[in-house]
Each structure stands twice: as structure tokens, then as C-alpha cells.
């Protein structure tokens, strides 16, 4: 799939209209249900292939955030060969009691992977926890930036957001093509 075809596929698979409460507390009349595109193998593979081109050189670990960043990060890991880690929203209270599963992040250059970014609140919380574990993080890669202040909020926390698509771009690309 090329970039245009991928935009159309994501839009068609996951764009919902209605009234939705976002994690940020905002109400939106448009929602991208990430699980609807992440569960489609052809779409997820194309996302990973496109996003793998955006991975900064020298990245040691791809850290997928719970829950939507995990399948995207895993697939990018498959495409690039860079090891991955799975980051929980909070530390597990049983078994190994870990916040991060998989690859060790201490003293490693970690690229955070997320699916959809609105305000960036959960990313900021997770990055603080990862940095406390010794991870070196400067960049966040996402599939969709909702263009709702996330990029700016992340910048205030010394994080650069690299989106595969911005919501305006997705809507514009999809609007130019007839939807089935």
C-alpha cells in the first residue's frame, strides 16, 4: 500500500462519527477506533512498513505503550529487527511486578510507540516512568496525531512527536476518494 492507500484504508476501517469521550476528557464527534485498524493484518503491516522508515537511527528499543502501541511496536520490531518492550500503564502487582515487559530499557535509546495521540497525557506519564528506569527518550512515533495539543504538550516534556498521519491529513486524503 502506498501512503494514500494506507490513509484511505485506516480511515475506512476505523473512522467513527458520533459523540465520544476521549481519555483527555475532551468530547469529540469523530473517533478513530485504533483497534479496528490494528486488527487488520494488511493495514497493520503497511503501517509498520511506513513507520519503520521514521525510526531514528541509533534506536535500541521500541517501547509500545499499553495497549494500542503494543501491536504497532511489535510489528515495527518485526520489520526493523529492533527489539521491543511492552509498557504497562502501571506496574504489575503480581508475578515479576514489572512496568516494562520484554527488552531492558536502562541506558538504552528508546523510541516510544503509540497509536493515536490526543493530549499526550498518558505518553508523558509513561515516559517519566521509563526515564526513571534509565531509558533515554527524545522521540515518540504514532500512527495518528489528533492535532489536539499532544505535539505541543510532548514538546514541553522534551519529546518530539513524529506522526505517520495527522488527523487533518487523514480526513483530507480520505475525503478526496469515494468511500465504499
Image: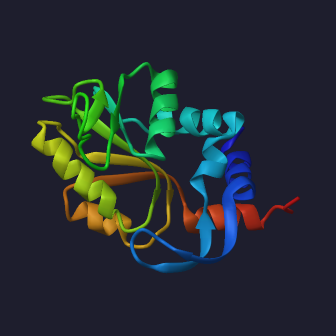
**Which x, y percent locates residue 36?**
66, 50
Residue 48 at x, y percent in the picture: 55, 35
**Is 25 drawn above or below residue 3 in the view shown?**
below
**In the picture, which quadrant includes the N terminus?**
top right
Position of the C terminus by quadrant: bottom right
Q: Position of residue 135 (x, y in %)?
A: 17, 37
Q: Residue at x 40, y 35 (%)?
A: 55
x, y percent for residue 54 = 44, 39
User: Along the horizontal axis of the image, is 78 left or right of 1?
Assistant: left
Is 84 positioned to the left or the right of 45 in the image? left
Name the one closer to the observer, 93 or 36.
93
* Residue lying at 51% horizontally and 37% vertically, measured from the top left: 71
93, above or below 124, in the image = above
- Can residue 59 be seen at all in this image of the molecule? no
**Residue 106 in sight:** yes
Q: Residue furthest top?
A: 81
Indicate whether 60 appears above or below 64.
above
Give the residue at x 45% y 26%.
77
Numbered label tally: 0
Q: Residue at x 43, y 18 (%)?
A: 81
Snapshot colouring: rainbow
Outermost front residue: 94
Q: Quadrant of residue 97?
A: top left
Amino acid at each position: 500500500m502506498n501512503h494514500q492507500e494506507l490513509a484511505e484504508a485506516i480511515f475506512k476501517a476505523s473512522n467513527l462519527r458520533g459523540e465520544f469521550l476521549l481519555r483527555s476528557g475532551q468530547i469529540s464527534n469523530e473517533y478513530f477506533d485504533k483497534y479496528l485498524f490494528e486488527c487488520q493484518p494488511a493495514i497493520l503491516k503497511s503501517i509498520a512498513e511506513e513507520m519503520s522508515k521514521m525510526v531514528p537511527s541509533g534506536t535500541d528499543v521500541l517501547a509500545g505503550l499499553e495497549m494500542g502501541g503494543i501491536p504497532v511496536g511489535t510489528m515495527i520490531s518485526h520489520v526493523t529487527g529492533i527489539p521491543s518492550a511492552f509498557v504497562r500503564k502501571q506496574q504489575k502487582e503480581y508475578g515479576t511486578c514489572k512496568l516494562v515487559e520484554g527488552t531492558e530499557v536502562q541506558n538504552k535509546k528508546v523510541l516510544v510507540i503509540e497509536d493515536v495521540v490526543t493530549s499526550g497525557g498518558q505518553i508523558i506519564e509513561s515516559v517519566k516512568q521509563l526515564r526513571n528506569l534509565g531509558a533515554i527518550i527524545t522521540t515518540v512515533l504514532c500512527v495518528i496525531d489528533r492535532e489536539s495539543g499532544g505535539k505541543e504538550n510532548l514538546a514541553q516534556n522534551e519529546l518530539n512527536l513524529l506522526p505517520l498521519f495527522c488527523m487533518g491529513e487523514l480526513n483530507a486524503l480520505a475525503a478526496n476518494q469515494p468511500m465504499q
